[in-house]
Amino acid sequence: GENVEQHPSTLSVQEGDSAVIKCTYSDSASNYFPWYKQELGKGPQLIIDIRSNVGEKKDQRIAVTLNKTAKHFSLHITETQPEDSAVYFCAATPGGSYIPTFGRGTSLIVHP
Amino acid sequence: EAGVVQSPRYKIIEKKQPVAFWCNPISGHNTLYWYLQNLGQGPELLIRYENEEAVDDSQLPKDRFSAERLKGVDSTLKIQPAELGDSAVYLCASSSGGRNTEAFFGQGTRLTVV
């Protein structure tokens, strides 16, 4: 089955800095890569996703890049704000599957 | 539009007791998921429903866990008997169906078994 590794487990930045979270996956057939943000006491919420036919996708301050050859993808948050503080999960969905495999999460802390 | 609603939010029970969680998905969503989230980890799938049919239930510990989705809408997840290791957050999610469609998560039920 799919295996997703996520790094770092904790990321602390100053407000206004950029934050980068990296993930690798094992199944070359994976073709859908969502990113979720989970705030304390809430369920995960999709913030951006990318499909295997695209190398990069951007939505305001967040962007995701995908390198299919190396089987890794990354989340980039620019101009971080305190409200960006949360746990972020990457996931990979094997082709033909309905079920994403999640990474272990990254706790992002943005200091004012 | 209301999101995925789960109840209760918190539950504390003694080991060997039964417990049940309830989920009301987003209206019109045919696909419903139950996930287990241990502290410091990502969600792990327990079971997926397509309408009222259970599919992808290979990760559900069937000796003590059961689930149902009557009429293809609301769903319940039951544990009987609960064990200490079952303490976790149980998340319900729903989607409109099809591969690679966004899953919307509820707030989860935090279960503590003492």
Image (spheres, grey):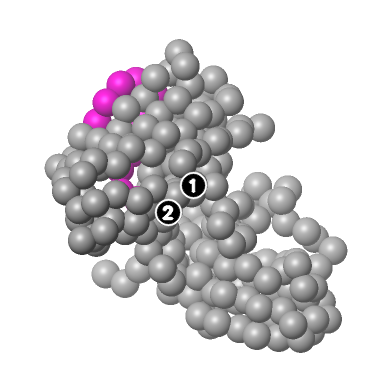
- Residue drawn 32% across the image and 27% down it: A65
- Asked where in the image residue B52 lies, by quadrant, the reply is bottom right
- Residue drawn 46% across the image and 33% down it: A23
Name the residue beneath numbered marker 1.
A9
* The C terminus of chain B sits in image quarter: bottom right
Nearest the viewer among B56 and A111 is A111
Left or right: residue A88 versus residue A83 is: right
Whether the residues at callouts 2 and 1 have beta carbons within 8 Å, the answer is yes
Give how far across and how far down residue B47 sits, in percent: 64, 55
Nearest the viewer among A18 and B18 is A18
Residues shaded magenta: A46-57
Chain letter for mark 2: A
- Residue drawn 59% across the image and 62% down it: B39
Magenta highlight on residue A52 = yes
Nearest the viewer among B71 and A78 is A78
Main SS of residues in magenta: strand
Sequence-first disc among 2 and 1:
1
Name the residue beneath numbered marker 2.
A107
Identity, as a three-letter code, of the amino acid under mark 2: Ser
